[in-house]
Amino acid sequence: MKITALAGGVGGAKLAHGLSQILPPDQFTIIVNTGDDFEHLGLYISPDLDTVCYTLAGLANPLTGWGRKDESWHAFNEMEKLAGQTWFRLGDRDLGTHLVRTERRKHGEKLSTITQNFCRAWGIEHTILPMTDDPVYTMVATKEMGELAFQEYFVHQRCEPSVTGFRFDGIEKALPAPGVLEAIDQADALVFCPSNPWVSIDPILAVAGVRSACATKPVVAVSPIIGGDVVKGPAAKMYRELGIQPSAYAVAKHYENLLQGFVVDTVDAELQASIEAMNISTLVTNTIMEDELGRLRLAKDVIDFVNSLIK
Ligand code: FO1
């Protein structure tokens, strides 16, 4: 069975890692959000792509989920001493990634080609695709500060401003990266990882042709909202600020027309009937991925669920 996953940062990377432990490289591909990408200190930074790659390669920082394990901070500490911009933390090992990517992009190489080469260097056998090679920037409209670039909102302002909406700058001109539509077309089913629906999965779906390609396939989404809150990130806060009660039901509703299956945590078992009333089969299981065994357990549950739906 071939699965293609759509993923954003930390939560998405964890499930993608679990799935990659079970499905061989020719049966599993990951399409990653690049709306979080930005230029910082002259460097081209692709946070979700790096989080997914580092996680699959076993190189991710286990405490933060982003950045590198066994990281050192010499460059960053020097920048602090020199009163440089330090709101976005870049460790020494991580800097190596950004320096090489930036250099190669300046020479006109595509993000998808660079990613493929990096994956090979990191020993990743599965295909990891950026959603697009074109520039797309997620912009967050806020009550207090107007429109903010995503990392300005997320890291610099610590997600504190109230969100009123989102815009994916550049999306009209963005074409799917090579392999993206093929990975969707060739999949038996798609999995939307437990990533933020507003700013991780929606930008991928907004790339030309992606939503309509997804609509032709069985789609299973895993709720990032558990018991009305999130393990990490601002998704629940965003739902509240947009006037929607955050819940697994709200996530299912968000993707409603695309979904054949939905996975909710056991604490949300009482939502099963209302989700199934939208004609979406619902699996209730433990969705917390506290360690690598947890990722594997959820990945296995998702694969079994997908199998039961496509039979
Ligand atoms: N997230 C933070 O909360 N603070 C940081 O300083 C930070 C630095 C960082 C550096 C490289 C990288 O690839 C990711 C980094 N992230 C940081 C995470 C990232 O900005 C967000 O998790 C994603 O964009 C949301 O998915």
Image: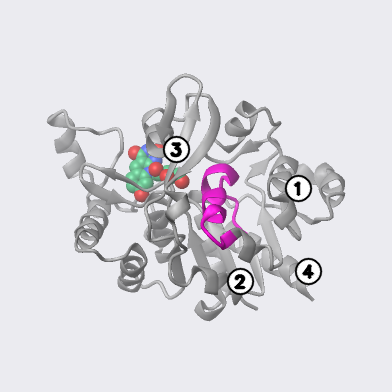
Residue at mark 3: 139
Image quadrant where one finds the N terminus: bottom right
CB of mark 2 near ligand 1 (< 8 Å): no
Q: For ligand 1, which image quadrant applies?
A: top left
| Three-letter code for the amino acid on which mark 1 is drawn | Thr
Judging from the image, what secondary structure is the residue with disc 3 in? strand
Viewer-proximal residue, 311 or 296? Answer: 311
Q: Residue at x 43, y 60 (%)?
A: 132
Residue at mark 1: 266
Residues marked 3 and 2 touching at CB (< 8 Å): no
Badge 3: residue crowd in 10 Å (few <14, some 14–19, many ≥20): many
Q: Which mark is residue 3?
A: 2
Cα distance in 3D space between marks 3 and 2: 30 Å
| Nearer to us: label 3 or label 2 | 3
The image shows residue 51 at horizontal and vertical percentages of 41, 54
Q: Magenta part of the protein: which range?
A: 192-210
| Residue 82 as seen in the image, left or right of residue 255 | left
| Three-letter code for the amino acid on which mark 2 is drawn | Ile
- Give the colouring mode of the picture: one colour
Residue 46 seen from this side: yes
Q: Residue at x 22, y 43 (%)?
A: 73
Cα distance in 3D space between marks 1 and 3: 34 Å
Q: Residue at x 66, y 70 (%)?
A: 189
| 3 or 2: tag closer to the N-terminus | 2
